[in-house]
Amino acid sequence: MRAFVPARPTAALTVLLLLSSALTPAFADTLVLPPAPAGLGHADSAPAPAGIPAYVDTGASNQRGDACLSTLETNAGVRLLSGFLEIWTPRTPFVDADQDAPAKDGCAAVTKSDWDGLPRSATDGTMKNPAVHAANLAYVIRTTAANTPEDDLEAYLDDRRGKSVSITDGLGPLADAWRKGAQQTTTVTDMPADATSVKYDDKGNNRGVGSKDGNAVMGKAVDLVEAGSKDGSTEPAKRYYKYARPYRWSEEVRVVPQLEPAKSTKPAGDGGFPSGHTAEAWRDALVMAYLVPQRYQEMVTRAVRMGENRIRAGMHQPFDVIGGRMQATAVVAYNLNRADYAGLKAEAYQQTQSFLATDTGAAGFDGLMALAHSAPAGTDPFADRAANADFVTPRFSYGLPKISAGDAAAVVPKGAEVLLETRLPYLDAAQRRLVLKSTALPAGYPIMSDAEGWGRLNLFAAADGFAAFDGDVTVTMDAAKGGFNTADSWKNDIAGEGRLVKTGSGSLTLSGINSFSGGVIVEDGTLVAKSSRAFGTGDLYISGGRVVVADAHPAVSGNLVLRRAGGLDVALSGKDGGITVAKSVAVEGGTLRVSLAAGYTPSVGDELSLIRSDSFNGTFEAIVLEGHDTVPVYGKTGLSLRITK
């Protein structure tokens, strides 16, 4: 290792630099530092929409058979999905499909509907947008016709198997430990050769064994998964909207042959919207993602896959799957916000993390994180994040035609931020709401543009942090708290005019192609740049902590300022790596550490470019490159490092 403390060289000093590896610092008294980025001067906000009953406050009203909770206005589950009324008018505007609701507390009785469950019959509802319905049904016909044997098997298992045990494969390398700790079992492990031996019911225990039944190692986790579904039935909405299954809309819909016996013979009691299987999978997946945030995106992907498998089975349409996802997301937020579950949440999280680490031999949260992403795609079908993103993104809207303005601003439902509580623990509740706002799905799609904002939540993208700084953002990460507080990575492309301030002892990695213009200030901890545009289009101001530049040839579009308390790490894979700065560089001191990528070994005499700029002023207190003797070469427009040994 060689540490340099150099002054800017004159012609005579250059000779001295070539002969010496330790120089006395000599900083110019006239060095003028550009000011720190000012940003917008305010934070953004994401208030819950005003004047709208919040699902997290009214979720208990999602009931069936109660005359006082049988209308759009009185039933939260029905109200949430009211966007469906833009494309479908049900036979009657009550939760009434196949049972009576007696008069109660001054509410008039609701009598059983005469809906027969058959599309286009005399008792059917009214289709209001034929083009959207045609696209919806066409997706089912096209998808079921393209099924492979593997698709049929997966669709069959997701239909017949307990939903909770089915989606545990989203946990990848941690799945076996979860099933062991939860004591989950299933009796549906394969698909019969034909429909004559179809298994109608999984004789396993679906979610596992809870704490009251003696599960001391992960019973609380099972309890929380159960609690996440409280008041979560899809039946009230099914009985209100009265929308038929796809195979009743068209004979071109192919039902997986082994599931033909599972088709209901009572259409009036078998509405398709919303999908109950999809909703249950999403409810359990989101709670499991809360407990095992190391696999957050993978569990979201698995929930999306369950919805797709309902279509592959021939049992549901995109309308149904969208509705199931929306309702489940709201139900989980409603339950995770309940005051009486606060203690259970904490206990379940600690119990889950502890048991999984102990059972797998992983060293705490970080060890579980490494293990969770250790299997190749051939073993773990959710191992590839890019493939997951490609799968889930089109299946939030299924590419259905837009029916309203696509530029409507995103709103965030009250309490939705709880869904990111363990995934982004270093952000406060208001900041997690901003993440949800900045990653929201586009507006205008059928059903999804509900007034509260549940339909546009994109939890897959939200797990990758902000997608826009529409105000200034300060991120404080306390590494002592462990988990994602110690280190996390934001992979979204971040837009906006706001500024990022990184403080706290933890490490934050920026991997997106970012365009935010407010600049970056690093006060403490570590900021890692893993893309060429990680810093956005503003200034980079390092007043403390360190900035680590991975081998991505990053650019600073504004000024680069390094104060004495700060540090900079640069990884090189060749002579022309380092950082490009569009404007000026001002170095008050600090340490520059240089590392070489695996496989790259410079030769004696090579001059490695570290910083290129429009103008360069100041010097580092020390420049360090392990294993080599070097001499820094300062110039008016940059800094390089000459290898002398």
Image (tube, rainbow, N blue to C red):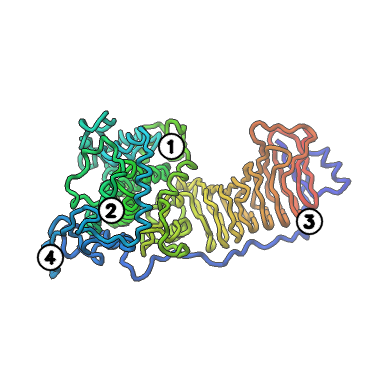
Q: CA distance from mark 2 to mark 4?
A: 24 Å
Secondary element at tag 3: loop
Q: Mark 1 sits on what residue?
A: 372
Q: Residue at x 43, y 42 (%)?
A: 294
Dot label at residue 28: 3
Secondary element at tag 4: loop
Dot label at residue 514: none
Q: CA distance from mark 4 to mark 3?
A: 87 Å
Mark 4 or 3, closer to the camera: 4
Q: Residue at x 22, y 64 (%)?
A: 93
User: The disc labelled 4 sits on which kind of residue?
Assistant: Ala
User: The disc labelled 1 sits on which kind of residue?
Assistant: Ala
Q: CA distance from mark 3 to mark 1?
A: 51 Å
Mark 3 or 2, closer to the camera: 2
Q: Mark 4 sits on what residue?
A: 109
The front one of 381 and 517 is 381
Residue 105 picture quarter: bottom left
Near mark 4 (Cα within 10 A), the count class, few <14, some 14-19 or many ≥20, is: some
The front one of 260 and 602 is 260
